[in-house]
């Protein structure tokens, strides 16, 4: 196909202009003539197409289109005459002429049978006669219309009189019909609403009449019991969803209500077994109400499958029993262990006092009576013995205090925390003497607590703050409160040496220290005591700190709130010790 088109458009012949010897007057004479003919030929089809589109009612309008195609082909042949003056594409020119010839022959052939039909069309004279006949018919029609109008006026007058007679009757009928339509519309809406509620309800809804026959069975009931609605309507309820063991009881209860009007299960929510279409029984929750107060009673039952709930209740009951047993075992074990630990701590601390007094007494006697005979190294050793005895004494006192804290019963009363802090600061004046400490005591709340134990909490925390700000030329210690997760939290903040948060899990353990004894004295029992006191109050304590930038201890006094969570920088975290 490509080769054919290429061959068709090839210009391998001498241009027609050579035949005119390229004489300008001859060449341009033919060019201008052919172009004018082409434009004339092209304008005629456009005019014909426009005429046909405007007068689609004309007979044989397709013939105009064939004439237009034929004339368009003729114009194209003249256009090719201009083209071949300079290009020898005579094959293309011949093909266009062939197409034009085909259109010409087709038009001529189609025109021949149309001539008789065109001649058969009525002439203007004949059309004029037809118009005169139509005008006469119109005149006769108008006369008939006038007579009909007079008759209509007469009938209209009589109709008005008749209408006046029927108006009253119609109004009365219309009023009655309107009322009836409203009643019917309300009834239909109620029925539609009832049907929508029944079909969309998640619970099973089943209605029976006074004979125990099923008259309503919604989609949820079909799904739950496995019965198609059409199969159960008209059957007795006792033969479908009631287990065999309860059928006689159901019949007796229905008969009793019909005889006495009393029903022990009406208006109550009860649990009972039901039966599916395949015979399997399952637990349901049931509520029965009576429908209608006049005539034979009808009953509607709302049922809900509680199989999953019963299974979940059983599992929860088993889990609770197991949890309760494990809690009791764990509690007994913990109580025994705590009692043994407290007894051991108290016993050890008490029994250590006598040997410590002996060591302290004999070391003092040696220094007093033989001090002059001892060299400087021996005297230094004796002083270190006495210093160790004093440290051991403080440790024994702290252990005894920790043991007493565990055994002591709370004497709870409403206490102002700010007054407790002021009392503690008064007791710690000796520890802060000679130091530049800026104290900031914010307003603090009143809480229900044991004031003696809470005083110990503030004493230990403030003593730590004084101790660990010792390297600072100007120390800053703040006691305040803030809201965290909807809970009031008390805090003690200082600008001391701080500590690394990666060791925060050891902070509240007994004998756990995060600093060298040579740098900061202490026994490692103070924070453990604070934690135990707050545990007894139902609170908890946690801390956040940064090395050489201070530390903040947060605690709550009552409630079981969760440990707060806050955003921290990469060098700041929070350690939370639950004390419940």
Image: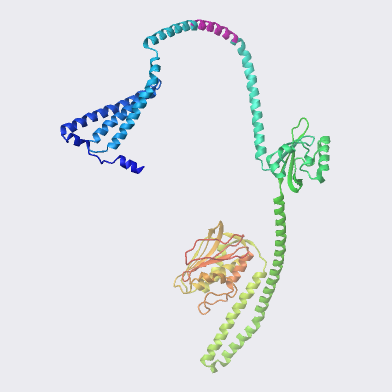
In the image, residue 574 lies at what x, y percent? 53, 65
> Looking at this view, is 199 or 257 the one in front?
199
> Looking at this view, is 387 or 193 the one in front?
193
348 lies above or below 218: below
The quadrant in which the N terminus is found is top left
In the image, residue 377 lies at what x, y percent? 52, 91
Tell me if residue 159 is in the magenta stretch: yes
**How was the colour assigned to the protein in this rendering?**
rainbow
Q: How many marks can you see?
A: 0
Please name the predominant secondary structure of the magenta segment in the image. helix
Using residue 359 as the reference point, say whether residue 119 is left or right of it.
Answer: left
Residue 416 placement: quadrant: bottom right
> Looking at this view, is 37 or 321 the one in front?
37
In the image, residue 298 lies at what x, y percent? 76, 34
Tell me if residue 89 is in the magenta stretch: no
321 lies above or below 146: below
488 lies above or below 510: above
Residue at position x 39%, y 9% in the image: 126
> Looking at this view, is 311 or 550 the one in front?
311
In the image, residue 174 lies at what x, y percent? 62, 18
Q: Is residue 49 visible?
A: no
């Amino acid at each position: 196909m490509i080769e054919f088109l290429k061959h068709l458009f090839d210009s391998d012949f001498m241009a027609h202009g050579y035949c005119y010897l390229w004489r300008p007057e001859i060449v341009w004479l033919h060019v201008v003539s052919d172009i004018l003919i082409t434009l004339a030929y092209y304008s005629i089809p456009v005019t014909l197409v426009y005429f046909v589109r405007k007068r689609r009612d004309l007979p044989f309008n397709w013939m105009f289109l064939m004439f237009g195609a034929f004339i368009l082909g003729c114009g194209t042949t003249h256009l090719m005459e201009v083209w071949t003056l300079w290009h020898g594409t005579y094959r293309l020119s011949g093909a266009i002429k062939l197409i034009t010839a085909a259109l010409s022959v087709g038009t001529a052939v189609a025109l021949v049978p149309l001539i008789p039909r065109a001649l058969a069309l009525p002439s203007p004279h004949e059309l004029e006669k037809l118009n005169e006949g139509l005008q006469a018919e119109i005149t006769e029609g108008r006369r008939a219309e006038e007579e009909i109008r007079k008759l209509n006026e007469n009938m209209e007058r009589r109709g008005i009189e008749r209408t006046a007679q029927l108006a009253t009757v119609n109004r009365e009928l219309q009023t009655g019909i309107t009322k009836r339509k409203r009643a019917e519309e309300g009834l239909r809406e109620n029925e539609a609403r009832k049907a929508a509620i029944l079909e969309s309800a998640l619970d099973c809804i089943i209605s029976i009449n006074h004979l125990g026959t099923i008259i309503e069975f919604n989609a949820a009931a079909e799904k739950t019991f496995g019965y198609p609605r059409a199969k159960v309507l008209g059957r007795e309820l006792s033969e479908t969803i009631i287990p065999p063991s309860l059928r006689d009881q159901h019949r007796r209860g229905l008969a009793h209500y019909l005889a006495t009007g009393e029903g022990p299960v009406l208006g109550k929510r009860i649990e009972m077994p039901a039966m599916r279409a395949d015979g399997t029984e399952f637990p349901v929750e049931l509520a029965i109400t009576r429908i209608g107060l006049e005539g034979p009673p009808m009953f509607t039952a709302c049922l809900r499958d509680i199989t999953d709930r019963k299974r979940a209740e059983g599992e929860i009951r088993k889990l609770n029993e197991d949890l309760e047993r494990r809690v009791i075992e764990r509690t007994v074990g913990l109580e025994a262990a705590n009692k043994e630990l407290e007894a051991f701590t108290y016993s050890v601390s008490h029994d250590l006092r006598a040997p410590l007094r002996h060591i302290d007494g004999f070391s003092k006697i040696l220094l007093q009576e033989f001090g002059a005979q001892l060299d400087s190294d021996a005297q230094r050793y004796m002083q270190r013995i006495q210093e160790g005895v004093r440290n051991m004494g403080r440790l024994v006192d702290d252990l005894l205090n920790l043991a007493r804290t565990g055994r002591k019963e709370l004497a709870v009363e409403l206490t102002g925390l700010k007054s407790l802090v002021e009392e503690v600061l008064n007791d710690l004046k000796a520890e802060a003497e000679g130091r530049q400490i800026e104290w900031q005591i914010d307003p603090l709340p009143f809480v229900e607590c044991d004031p003696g134990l809470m005083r110990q909490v503030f004493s230990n925390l403030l003593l730590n703050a004084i101790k660990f700000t010792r390297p600072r030329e100007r120390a800053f210690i703040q006691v305040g409160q803030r809201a965290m997760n909807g809970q009031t939290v008390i805090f003690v903040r200082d600008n001391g040496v701080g500590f690394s948060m990666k060791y925060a899990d050891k902070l509240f353990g007994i004998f756990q220290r995060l600093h060298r004894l040579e740098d900061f004295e202490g026994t490692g029992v103070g924070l453990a005591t604070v934690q135990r006191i707050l545990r007894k109050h139902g609170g908890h304590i946690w801390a956040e700190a940064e090395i050489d930038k201070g530390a903040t201890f947060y605690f709550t006094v009552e409630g079981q709130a969760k440990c707060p969570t806050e955003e921290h920088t990469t060098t700041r975290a929070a350690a939370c010790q639950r004390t419940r």
